[in-house]
Amino acid sequence: MRTVLRAERDRGISLYQRAEDLESLEAAQTVVLGRKSAFSEIQRSLGALDPDERRDVGKIANEARQALTEAFDTRRSAMDAIVETALLAADAMDLSLPGRRARHGSFHPLTIVERELVQVFTSLGFKVAEGPEIEDDWHNFQALNIPPDHPARTMKDSLYVSVPGHPELLLRTETSAVQIRTMQSQPPPVYIVAPGRVFRRETPDATHSPVFHQLEGLAVDEGITFADLKGTLEAAVKALFGQDRRVRLGPAFFPFVEPGCEVGVSCFRCDGVGCTVCGSGWIELLGAGMVHPQVLENCGYDSERYTGFAFGMGIDRVALLKYAIPDIRMLFDGDMRFLAQFEGVA
Ligand code: FA5
């Protein structure tokens, strides 16, 4: 028995030391100390021995069990340390790897164009003005010489806002309302541009959106003529599109200017021939004219002494032309594949 116990002890220690993982370590423990092991069998038969022999063999059995427990614990701790080291290694940072660049957003193409327009006009001496998107009838229509029966006032074109006690509020249909607010708030001379959102009941197509952006311009001073308007617009269009794009100026009627005109730029796609983007070969960019004397008077300006010019440019249309965008709706869809192309542009 003594020999068997010592042999089992040595076998167990050796099995433990060779165990590669926790599973095989526990399997070795079952083999050496489990219910069916030689070790357990000897311990079960101790009762049949005479007292002296039982004490002696029992002592050896306890010592052997003690040695096995220690060997088991030592191997177990060594395994835990290996696992921990492996986990740490897996988690470790490779400081030599290149960093991951954090992706920061970019400006929307409309913001890029609006900033560029403002830059062009402020460099010519204009200041930036603002007005509300919800306007009243007087600023949006009456002061701009738009009589009550003008088609632009019908529900077909305008979007009215229902506010109890304020029956005549609407989403502004053009930034021209800012002309009125500016002239009411200061004496001449005035040199302002006013970028902003405008709203119309329109069916969307490649160049029309029911919500779009305009940049209003207004210059009122002594001695301002149509030549000043033409020179300012030509300088702006060249600064925006370069020398190559063809510009055409034609007559147009707006109740708040006299005479009025509109400016078109040759289409970026067909260059004046006519295509599905533009229809006619030209993309209408802005309306303009000499401020109507009645509008000056409506704002308390002396129309005998002061003259002025005004224009309203479609910012979305400038974006279409500058970046050859085939459909205005792409500016409002929020598609990242489209917007990401403007990263790094400004
Ligand atoms: C006006 O809104 C006038 N207030 C412009 C003006 C200002 C004339 C000052 C005289 C003096 P119009 O409706 O044509 O005019 O619009 C001006 C520009 O806005 C157009 O040339 C075009 O570039 C743009 N625009 C008009 N409607 C739309 C639309 N639905 N979607 C996108 N852009 C549009």
Image (cartoon, rainbow, N blue to C red):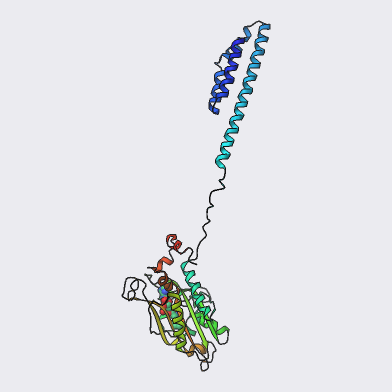
Looking at the picture, how far across and down is residue 193, in whole percent? Answer: 51, 79
Looking at the picture, how far across and down is residue 109, in whole percent? Answer: 46, 67
For residue 85, what is the image quadrant?
Answer: top right
Looking at the picture, how far across and down is residue 69, in whole percent? Answer: 63, 22
Looking at the picture, how far across and down is residue 284, in whole percent? Answer: 39, 77
* Quadrant of the displayed image that contains ligand 1: bottom left
For this orientation, the residue located farthest to the front is 96
Q: Nearer the viewer, residue 199 or 314?
A: 314
Q: Nearer the viewer, residue 97 or 181?
A: 97
Against 66, is 179 above or below?
below
The residue positioned 66% from the left and 7% from the top of the image is 53
**Residue 201 visible in rendering:** no
Q: How many numbered circles does the render carry?
A: 0
The residue positioned 58% from the left and 15% from the top of the image is 8
**From the viewer's perspective, is 110 left or right of 75?**
left
Q: Quadrant of the N terminus?
A: top right
For this orientation, the residue located farthest to the bottom is 304
Q: Nearer the viewer, residue 298 or 274?
A: 274
The residue positioned 55% from the left and 15% from the top of the image is 37
For this orientation, the residue located farthest to the top is 50
Against 1, is 257 above or below?
below
Q: Nearer the viewer, residue 131 or 345?
A: 345
**Residue 219 visible in rendering:** yes
**From the viewer's perspective, is 204 left or right of 65?**
left
**From the viewer's perspective, is 344 left or right of 65?**
left
